């Protein structure tokens, strides 16, 4: 397949590397800046451009991997003149209808993973969710996805948006909490590495426990004196203090709902 990748950011970089490792390197890389396009193109041995008009006309597939707010604009500029190319974007929250009126062959290839350019990962294990506006497009995108991943599924735009929302909570928001924790430790002369065993065990438990059953901490136990004390420690940062109080309330409510459903009322369990 002759594949064009529009974008050279985190997601586009991993797509290009995965395709190259699978023996199907991209033919061309586009980026807004020639430097970014060339940097990625050199890693996978293909052509680079920063001009959308120079995108090859006879590509079999074109992966649009840019910020969500630019997908429609990019598609509007490249899709109409390339009717034989199957276009796909990689967004979790942008519907397939972003291509409406632009091309008869289009869809979505959403890899559900957190990507950083300089962090290697095994693309074969990444869940990929595919959608196509017709059978031929869907088969092309499925074929491409299955070349780089062993975990490929069909999913509608509506379901994918809910999946992406869940992923934001599970990944982006949790990592934001790690940033907060890192800041707290640094301000007190401590290192984030001390938390890594805790984080690893928290994730590991989810292999055998439902998230609600894996929850621990003062909010689960109802230790109000501890929560009040810790909230007071954040008095110099009102936004973090409010976040701590709100998260504690959410956890306590989740635990209360669980106890009601299970009929459990244990006042002393830790």
Image (tube, rainbow, N blue to C red):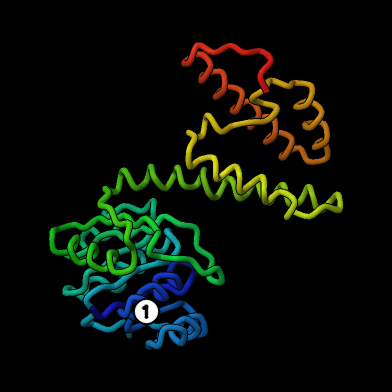
Residue lying at 63% horizontally and 32% vertically, measured from the top left:
247
Q: Disc 1 designates what residue? A: 20
Residue 91: image x %, image y %?
38, 57
Q: Say which quarter of the image contains residue 100.
A: bottom left
How far across and down, in percent of the image, does residue 175 sit? 60, 50
Of residue 243 and residue 118, the one placed in the foreground of this image is 118
Residue in the picture at 50% in, 84% down: 39
Where the N terminus falls, by quadrant?
bottom left
Say above or below: 159 vs 82.
above
* Residue at the front extreme of this rendering: 208
The secondary structure type at the circle numbered 1 is helix
Viewed as shown, does residue 247 lie left or right of 193? left
Q: Residues within 10 Å of mark 1 (few under 14, many from 20)?
A: some
Please identify the quarter of the rendering in which residue 107 is found. Answer: bottom left
Q: Residue at x 29, y 48 (%)?
A: 157
The residue depicted at 46 percent of the width and 77 percent of the height is: 32
Q: Is 178 left, or right, of 115 in this rendering?
A: right
Residue 218: % across, % down? 70, 27
Give the vertical position of 227 relative to 114 (above or below).
Answer: above
- Identify which residue, 107 or 269, lies in the foreground: 269
Is residue 66 left or right of 183 when viewed as pictured? left
Quadrant showing the C terminus? top right
Q: How many marks?
A: 1
Farthest-out residue, left: 135
Above/below status of 119 relative to 153: below
Q: Compared to 212, does 10 lie above or below?
A: below
């Amino acid at each position: 397949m002759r594949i064009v990748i529009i974008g050279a950011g985190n997601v586009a970089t991993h797509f290009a590397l995965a395709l190259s490792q699978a023996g199907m390197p991209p033919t061309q890389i586009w980026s807004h800046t020639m430097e970014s396009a060339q940097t990625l193109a050199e890693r996978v041995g293909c052509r680079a451009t920063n001009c959308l008009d120079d995108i090859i006309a006879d590509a079999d597939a074109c992966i649009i991997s840019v910020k969500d707010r630019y997908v429609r604009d990019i598609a509007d500029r490249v899709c109409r003149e390339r009717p034989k190319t199957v276009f796909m974007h990689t967004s979790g929250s942008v519907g397939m209808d972003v291509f409406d009126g632009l091309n008869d062959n289009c869809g979505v290839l959403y890899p559900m993973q957190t990507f950083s350019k300089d962090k290697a990962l095994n693309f074969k294990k990444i869940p990929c969710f595919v959608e196509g506006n017709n059978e031929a497009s869907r088969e092309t995108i499925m074929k491409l996805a299955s070349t780089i991943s062993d975990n490929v599924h069909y999913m509608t735009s509506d379901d994918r948006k809910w999946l992406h929302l869940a992923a934001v909570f599970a990944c982006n928001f949790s990592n934001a909490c790690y940033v907060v924790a890192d800041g707290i430790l640094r301000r007190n002369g401590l290192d984030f590495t001390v938390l890594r065993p805790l984080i690893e065990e928290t994730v590991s438990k989810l292999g055998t426990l439902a998230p609600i059953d894996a929850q621990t901490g003062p909010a689960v136990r109802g230790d109000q004196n501890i929560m009040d004390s810790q909230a007071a420690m954040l008095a110099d940062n009102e936004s973090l203090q409010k976040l701590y109080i709100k998260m504690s309330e959410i956890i306590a409510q989740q635990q209360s709902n669980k106890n009601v459903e299970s009929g459990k009322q244990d006042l002393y369990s830790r």
